[in-house]
Amino acid sequence: MKSTQLQTDLWRQAWFLELSSNSKLLFLYLISNYHTNVLSLSKYSIRELEFELNLTSDIIFKCLDELKEQVVVSFNLERTVVWIWVVNALKNSLGYKSKLTMKNVKGILADENIPDNIRKAVLEAYSNFLPEVDFVNTIPLSKREIIVIRDGFKCCYCSRPFDSIKEIHIDHIIPKSRGGSDTYENLVSSCSRCNLEKLDLMPDDIEKRPTNRFYSKSDAIKDLKKPDVFKKYRALFMKN
Ligand SMILES: [Zn+2]
């Protein structure tokens, strides 16, 4: 038997009281069932949920939507299974910042099958602890993020650092229209202004030719382990 801490003030919280009774049941199930763990992040078979809760799958999905609306649950449906994460389960338990808890979290996140959207949400929620516990390997990095990490979080043409992700454009050094490829060597980060100015010019037509270099996901992870690099990554790509 595993033991988890339950919030005893749950029944005094407005969002909980406003839920339909089926959603209340589902939520209580999610934080107390046999599969659950310190993160309350687990994979459930839909048939099992139907059986244990005595609800139809349609009702279960409706409840999940209701819980998602309250931002208490994040889920990902894959045919016959559903991944569900109870967003604040860990934060509401005592001593959640302890080394042991973080070790458990790391163990849970080691499962490669966790869907990217949930993994990213979990990592965002706990990014404050990331440097200490070395979660960096488990961050799902997009190609765009990898390029921005390589290019030092700034525009390769004017060197202006990015303040928000909205400013980030990925520019083809040799334009796509002229046969440029989508490889890391041909892609650089650019601000919107420089990206517009460049249009379809070839590198030789441009005064400031950007330096590009081969780079891969493992290089990005290596760089992210440097605290100053991680700090910039977190500020730009993670919400917390
Ligand atoms: Zn620029």
Image: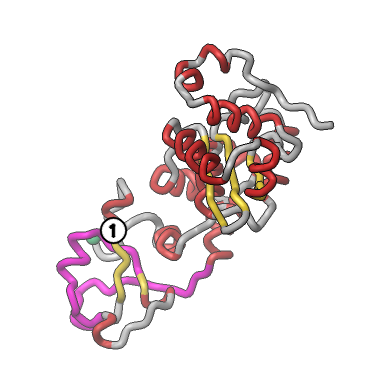
| Picture quarter with ligand 1 | bottom left
**What amino acid is labelled 1 in the image?**
Ser
Please tell me how crowded label 1 is: few (under 14), some (14-19), or many (20+) other residues with Cα within 10 Å.
Answer: some
Reading the image, the residue beneath label 1 is: 159
Mark 1 falls on what kind of element? Answer: loop
Q: Which residues are magenta?
A: 188-216
**Frontmost residue, 95 versus 215:** 95
Q: Give the number of callouts.
A: 1
* Residue 193 on the magenta span: yes
Q: Position of residue 156 (x, y in %)?
A: 31, 64
Which part of the image, by quadrant, shows the C terminus?
Answer: top left
**Frontmost residue, 58 versus 104:** 58
The residue drawn where x is 33% and y is 56% is 154
Q: Is residue 45 above or below residue 155?
A: above
The residue drawn where x is 30% and y is 57% is 168
Q: Position of residue 192 (x, y in %)?
A: 21, 60
Q: Is mark 1 within 8 Å of ligand 1?
A: yes
- The answer to whether residue 25 is left or right of residue 4 is left
Q: Residue furthest left?
A: 197
Q: Is residue 139 above or below residue 28?
A: below
Residue 23 in sight in this render: yes
**Frontmost residue, 128 versus 12:** 12
- The answer to whether residue 177 is left or right of residue 111 is left
